[in-house]
Amino acid sequence: MNKIFQKFHSLRKRSFFAILFVGLVPSFILTILSYQFLRDRLISSDVTDMATQAALISDELISSDYFSNPDQEAINLELSSVGNVYSGRVMILDNTLMVIKDTYDMYEGRTMVWENAIISAYGDTTSDYDEENRTLTVAIPVMVEEEVKGIVIITESAEYIETILEYYRSFGILVFIIILILIVALAIALSYFTARPLIHVKKAIDNLSKGFGDGTLNVDEVAETVDISEAFNRYNSQMKLLDDSRQEFVSNVSHELKTPLTSVKVLAESITSMGDGVPVEMYQEFMTDIVSEIDRETKIVNDLLSLVKMDKTDATMDVSPVNMNELIEIIMRRLKPIAEKQQIELVMESFRPVTVEMDEVKFSLALSNLIENGIKYNEPGGYVHVSLNADHKYCYIRVEDSGLGIPEDSLDHIFERFYRADKSHSREIGGTGLGLAITQNAIRMHHGEIKVASTLGEGTTFDVRVPLSYIKEEA
C-alpha cells in the first residue's frame, strides 16, 4: 500500500488524477442517468399511448357486449388493425383469464396464467417491458359497474425503442470519449500549472544554495509562493542570525578560555624569571593567583558543559515530584555564607506548600544562578527576596533583589551567552556570562518561562513560571 502511495507522491500526479476523477466521475454518472431517463421516458410514453388505446377498445367491448358474443367481425377486424399498428398483438381475456380473442390466433381458448393479467383481473392497469424479447405489454381491466368483465392486453414491438437507445449509447460513448480527451488534456495542463510555481521555488532555492542571487527568495507567481518566499526569507534570516550568534559564541568561548590561560602563563613565566632571594610570600601570592585563574577556567568549562547538555534536544530529564519549598530553603542555606559575607539579607516567602514534577538537579541550578546573581550584583546592606506561590496549573517563583539593576538596553540580551551588562563588575566577581543562559535553558526544558524587570540602581526582579505537572514531549 505504501508503494502505491509513493507513486502518487508527486503533486503533479496527485493534481492530474484528482482533476481526472472530478471530471470523469460526474460525466459518467450524468451519461448513465440521462440514458436511464431517456429509456424510462420512451417506455412511459408508449405505455400511456397503449393504455389509452386499450381503454377505447374496452369501451367498445362493453358497448357491443363482446364477452357474450366474441365472433363480432367488425370488432375483431379493429383488434387486428390495432395489433398491426403496434407491430404486435391484441388479446382479450374474460374474468377467468381465458383468452377469447388473440390476433395471432395462438392462445384462444387457453387460460393465461401471467402475473400482469392476474393483477389486472383485480382491477389494476399494468405494464411490462421485456428487454430481452424487445416487447412492451400493457394490460387493463374491462370494468362494468366496478366489476371486472375481462382484460385487454396489447403487446407492442419495442424494436424502435432499442434502436433509439442503441443510437444514444453509441452517441454517449462518443461524447464520453471526447470529454475524456478534453479532461485528460485539462488535467495535464492544470497539474502542470499547479506544480510549476513550486518547481520555480525549488529552482530558486537550489540557486541560492549554490551562491547565486542576493540570498533572498522571491517567487511571486501565486499567493502561496509569496507566502513560502516570505517564510523562507524569515527562516533564512533567523539562520543567519543563528550562524552569527554561533560564530560570536565560538569567539567568546575562545577568548574566555584563553584569558585565564594567558594569565597563568604570565604568572608562571614571572615565577620562572625570578632570581634567588625572592621572598616566599611573593611566590605564595603568585601561586594563589595561578590557582584563582585555574578555578576561573574550571568554572567556565563546567558552565559550558552544563549549557551544552541543556542545549541537546534529546537531553534526558530525571523527572520526579519535588517539594519546591524545601528545595528553595536548601539553596538559600547553601548560599547564606556568601550572602553574609556580602552583608546581603536573604528572605524567603512561601504562600502554600508546592510540589512540582521536575528534574531537581537542572532546576536547582537555575534557581541557584538567579539567587546567587542577586547576591553578587548587590550592595552591602541589600536584600534578596524569594517568593513561592502556585495555582491549579503553574508554580510561580519570584527572585527580587535591591542590587545594581540592569540597563534598559541590556534587558533583551542578558540571556545571551557571555553577555554582561556590566563587564567591569562581572570581571571583578568572576562571572562567566553563562549563568542566565543556563538558567533560561533549564526553565525551558521544564516548559516554563522566565521574565525580567529591572531599574538601574534600584534592583532586578526575575519571575519564573513552570507547570506543576511535567509535559512530556511526543517522540
Image: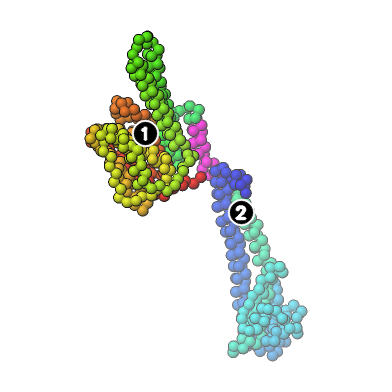
Q: Distance of mark 1 from mark 2, alpha carbons?
A: 75 Å
From the image, tell me which residue sits under label 1.
Answer: 435
Q: Dot 1, crowdedness within 10 Å: few (<14), some or many (≥20)?
A: many
Q: Is residue 367 above or below residue 92?
A: above
Residue 198 on the magenta segment? yes
Residue 59 x/y as whole percent: 62, 84
Q: How many marks?
A: 2
Residue 424 visible? The answer is yes
Give amino acid for label 2. Answer: Phe
Q: Is residue 277 left or right of residue 203?
A: left
- Mark linked to residue 176: 2
Q: Secondary structure at mark 2?
A: helix
Give amino acid for label 1. Answer: Gly
- Mark linked to residue 311: none
Q: Quadrant of residue 298?
A: top left
Please report whichever mark, 1 or 2, sits nearer to the chain's N-terminal start: 2
Q: Quadrant of residue 151?
A: bottom right
Q: Residue at x 59, y 89 (%)?
A: 145
Q: Secondary structure at mark 1?
A: helix
**Main secondary structure type of the part rendered in magenta:** helix
Residue 44 x/y as whole percent: 60, 71
Q: Residue at x 65, y 84 (%)?
A: 121
- The magenta-colored residue range is 186-206
Q: Is residue 102 left or right of residue 317?
A: right
